[in-house]
Image (spheres, grey):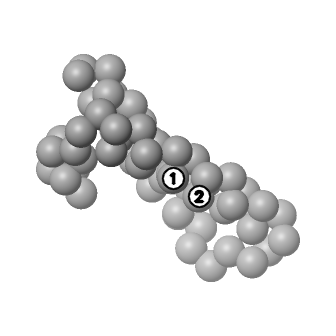
Amino acid sequence: MKSDIKNKTKDDLEAMIKEKREALKNFRFGIAGSRVKNVKEARTNRKDIARAMTLLRQK
């Protein structure tokens, strides 16, 4: 996963950040309704967002 992010373009990284933020928002609403099975999903999404933003700043 980490190596895949390094090969992405600026536009791809921005799209990924947008997608992960949307997934994180949906996760939070799922928690409120107790529909979520994978409770570690939020942690992985936040880490992926941070990795993408770091690489975006470097480029």
Contact (Cβ within 8 Å) of mark 1 with mark 2: yes
Position of residue 45 measured from the top left corner of the image (x, y, whole percent)? 48, 53
Q: Which residue is mark 1?
A: 19
Q: Which mark is residue 23?
A: 2
Residue 20 drawn at (x, y percent)? 51, 51
Question: Do we see residue 47 in this rendering?
Answer: no
Structural crowding at the residue carrying mark 1, measured as other residues with C-alpha within 10 Å and reported as few (<14), some (14–19) or many (≥20):
some
Q: Hey, which residue is sitting farthest top in the picture?
A: 58
Helix, strand or loop status at disc 2: helix
Q: Nearer the viewer, mark 1 or mark 2?
A: 1
Taking the image as shown, residue 2 lies to the left or right of residue 14, namely left
Q: Is residue 55 left or right of residue 33?
A: left
The residue at 15%/50% (across/down) is 3
Q: What amino acid type should be assigned to the residue bearing mark 1? A: Glu
Amino acid carrying mark 2 in the image: Ala
- Tell me if residue 47 comes above or below residue 41 in the rendering: above
Where residue 19 appears, as percent x and y from the top left, is 51, 52
User: Which residue is the extreme one toward the front?
Assistant: 11
Q: Nearer the viewer, residue 42 or 55?
A: 55
In the rendered structure, the answer to whether residue 2 lies left or right of residue 26 reads: left
Instruction: Give the residue drawn at x 23%, y 22%.
Output: 59
- Element on which disc 1 rests: helix
